């Protein structure tokens, strides 16, 4: 019984610590607002809503109707100390229940500023709803806005930001690796044995298709923000789509008696995607409480976006196949073409995605094209018999590093010069207006640590500019020259200087926001180049590695040479990432690692779903059982016809 009493006391103490926030500091009332109740006598002070009043009243009535506890003052009481401890635990538990019911529940993320603040007792949310079903906040998508800039600076200035950034960067690839190892757990039979011995392949194909279509609906959730589907609907659509895809391949294999079916990972996708579109459209139309015309338009836009991704999916395997089967003397030109192809596809995909989904166009295009390019380049290095491709890759990385450093240095110096001119204009305007402020705006602007902090000060000072860069704003409005009229030449001069100062603020903020947005995608590209060799080497350790056409296991010397090429690319990708990080810190005074961590945290569901989908699709494109022969020789069909 004494142990039970100690457990009750410990539970009450832990409950008070949970309400207080962290447990290592005393409970502060201002942390959770003025709605916290400390005793049952303060219940009448809370009149926020009717539901909480009814809960408090019912709790108060229940406490009054309970029998009176044992009177510890009676001398004839047996086990007086134990009874007193039991009464103390009962009172503490009752008080804790009153405080829990009377505390107002605040959201973790404020919608107006986009920041995450722990303010009071927050209702627990499951991992599924917190990390999986929650799309990226609207104010933190796309180009940098006022809300996104504040969120990034607070993310950068938070407690233990460097350790958190390193933890996020090191743990982000692990979900993709675990999913890929899970779907490759079933050993596959030789494709020459026919479709009757390919039961494990069809099971693996269904699991992979289900995961891929689930990841597609994560992307759909970001593209169509107001698409409201239940959890079972989100799972039922990928289940039906995966079944349709596998049944198509199985039906063709049974009717024509051929295995593998040529390009069985490409052509069945279109019918499966059409079936999913019909199911989602049916559920959207059934919701009569909303206007569904805009949703149908967004669904069509997502279908076009998925078609563009399928086009990129076909282009890179064809280029990689050409690289493998060409002689060594001609691989030089393919190695030169690969970076140019990546730049062209990146611009085309970004342009198409921006027209369809401007908020997530940059992240989708960068992740898609860069991941495709890096992974297939690893395949080319793995199967290459010469060092030409590795040398071209190193030369391209050196050129990219030099171009990035030169561009960033020039942009930084130009922005610093523009900031100095803006400070001089602000001082001249303050001298003419004769303001009596203790610390002028020009002085605060001169004390800013970097151009990003100066941009935030400008937006806080200029309300018009802040509204233009808010989430609800319509973008930048160019400041036109105004014609001033008045009897005083001094008033005309002040108005002209004010208009010029606002135009300078507008131009400075526009360039800083564009610089942050461009660095965001360049740093993400460097990070993807760094982690893709790790993901690719995982595929070579799987039991089905012998059936991948792009993982040719030769003798020990050639395997060691291919492994050396991949490791060399990994090392130079790490050097490139380090150079980018140092350059951003040197010329902008912003932590590049924290900016990458901010991207990975902000677009957590979207980026992780993209990586999982792409690693599954790209690796299964090279699987012999999928029949993706981009040379169009189809040797197994000729062998099957000869045997028949």
Image (tube, grey):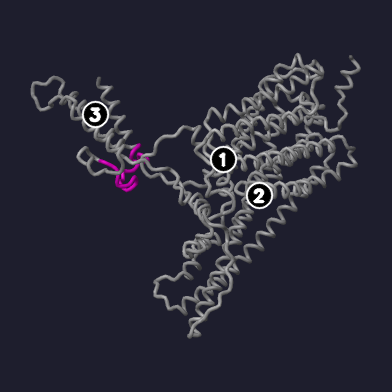
Crowding at mark 1 (Cα within 10 Å: few <14, some 14-19, many 20+): some
**Residue at the spot 39% in from the left edge and 71% down from the top edge:** 438
Q: Which mark is residue 354?
A: 2
Image quarter of the C terminus:
top right
Q: CA distance from mark 1 to mark 2?
A: 23 Å
Q: Nearer the viewer, mark 3 or mark 2?
A: 2
Mark 3, secondary structure of its residue: helix
Residue 378 left/right relative to 636: left
Mark 2, secondary structure of its residue: helix
Q: Which mark is residue 240?
A: none
**Residue at the spot 61% in from the left edge and 53% down from the top edge:** 517
Mark toward the start of the polypeptide (3 vs 2): 3
Image quarter of the N terminus:
top left
Residue tagged 3:
89
Q: Residue 555: give x, y in percent of width and height.
A: 82, 27
Q: Which residue in the rendered view is the most extreme toward the left?
A: 75
Q: Nearer the viewer, mark 3 or mark 1?
A: 1
Residue contact at pointers 1 and 2, CB within 8 angstroms: no
Q: CA distance from mark 3 to mark 1?
A: 56 Å
**Residue at the spot 60% in from the left edge and 38% down from the top edge:** 220
Crowding at mark 2 (Cα within 10 Å: few <14, some 14-19, many 20+): some
Task: Pick the residue in front: 232 or 134.
Answer: 232
Q: Residue 387: give x, y in percent of width and height.
A: 82, 41
Q: Nearer the viewer, mark 1 or mark 2?
A: 1
Q: Is residue 9 above or below residue 576?
A: above
Mark toward the start of the polypeptide (3 vs 1): 3
Q: CA distance from mark 3 to mark 2?
A: 61 Å
Residue stretch rendered in magenta on the structure: 18-37
Q: Which mark is residue 292?
A: 1
Mark toward the start of the polypeptide (1 vs 2): 1
Q: Residue 82: give x, y in percent of width and height.
A: 19, 23
């Amino acid at each position: 019984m004494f142990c039970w009493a100690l457990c009750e006391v410990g539970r009450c103490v832990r409950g008070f610590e949970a309400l207080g926030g962290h447990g290592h500091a005393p409970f502060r009332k201002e942390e959770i607002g003025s709605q916290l109740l400390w005793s049952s006598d303060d219940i009448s002070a809370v009149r926020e809503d009717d539901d909480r009043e009814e809960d408090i009243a019912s709790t108060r009535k229940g406490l009054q109707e309970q029998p009176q506890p044992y009177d510890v003052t009676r001398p004839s009481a047996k086990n007086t100390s134990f009874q007193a401890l039991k009464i103390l635990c009962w009172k503490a538990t009752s008080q804790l229940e009153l405080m829990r019911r009377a505390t107002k529940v605040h959201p973790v993320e404020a919608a107006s500023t986009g920041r995450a603040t722990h303010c009071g007792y927050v209702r627990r949310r499951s991992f599924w709803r917190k990390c999986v079903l929650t799309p990226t906040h609207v104010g933190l998508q796309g180009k940098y806005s006022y809300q996104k800039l504040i969120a990034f600076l607070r993310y950068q200035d938070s407690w233990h930001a460097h350790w958190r950034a390193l933890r996020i960067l090191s743990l982000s690839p692990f979900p993709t690796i675990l999913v890929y190892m899970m779907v490759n757990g079933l050993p596959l039979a030789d494709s020459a044995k026919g479709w009757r011995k390919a039961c494990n392949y069809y099971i693996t194909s269904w699991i992979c298709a289900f995961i891929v279509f689930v990841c597609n609906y994560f992307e759909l959730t970001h593209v169509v923000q107001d698409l409201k589907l239940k959890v079972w609907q989100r799972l039922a659509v990928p289940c039906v789509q995966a079944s349709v895809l596998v049944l198509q391949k199985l039906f063709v294999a049974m009717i024509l008696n051929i295995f593998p079916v040529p390009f069985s990972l490409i052509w069945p996708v279109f019918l499966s995607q059409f079936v999913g579109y019909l199911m989602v459209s049916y559920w959207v139309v059934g919701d009569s409480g909303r206007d569904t015309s805009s949703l149908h338009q967004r669904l069509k836009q997502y279908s076009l976006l998925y078609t563009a991704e399928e086009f990129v999916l076909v282009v890179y395997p064809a280029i990689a196949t050409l690289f493998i089967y060409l002689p060594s003397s001609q691989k030089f030109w393919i190695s030169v073409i690969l970076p140019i192809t990546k730049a062209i596809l990146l611009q085309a995909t970004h342009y198409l995605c921006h027209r369809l989904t401007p908020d997530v166009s940059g992240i989708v295009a960068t992740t898609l094209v860069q991941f495709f390019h890096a992974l297939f380049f690893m395949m080319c290095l793995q199967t290459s018999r010469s060092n030409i491709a590795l040398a071209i890759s190193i030369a391209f990385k050196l050129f990219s590093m030099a171009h990035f450093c030169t561009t960033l240095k020039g942009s930084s110096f130009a922005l610093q010069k523009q900031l100095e001119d803006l400070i001089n204009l602000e001082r001249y305007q303050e001298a003419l207006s004769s303001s009596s402020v203790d610390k002028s705006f020009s002085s605060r602007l001169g004390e800013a640590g970097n151009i990003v902090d100066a941009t935030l000060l400008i937006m806080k000072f200029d309300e018009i500019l802040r509204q233009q860069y808010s989430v609800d704003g319509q973008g930048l409005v160019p400041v036109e020259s105004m014609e001033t009229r008045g009897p005083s030449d001094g008033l005309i001069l002040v108005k002209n200087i004010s208009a010029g100062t606002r135009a300078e603020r507008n131009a400075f903020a526009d360039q800083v926001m564009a610089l942050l947005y461009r660095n965001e995608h360049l740093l993400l590209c460097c990070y993807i180049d760094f982690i893709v060799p790790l993901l690719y080497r995982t595929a070579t350790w799987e039991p089905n590695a012998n059936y991948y056409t792009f993982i040719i296991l030769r003798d020990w010397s050639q395997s060691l040479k291919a492994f050396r090429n991949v490791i060399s690319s990994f090392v130079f990708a790490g050097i490139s990432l380090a150079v980018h990080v140092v350059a951003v810190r040197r010329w902008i005074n912003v932590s590049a690692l924290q900016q990458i961590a901010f991207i990975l945290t902000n677009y957590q569901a979207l980026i992780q779903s993209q990586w999982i989908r792409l690693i599954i699709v790209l690796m299964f494109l090279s699987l012999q059982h999928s029949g993706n022969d981009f040379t169009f020789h189809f040797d197994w069909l000729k062998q099957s016809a000869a045997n028949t």
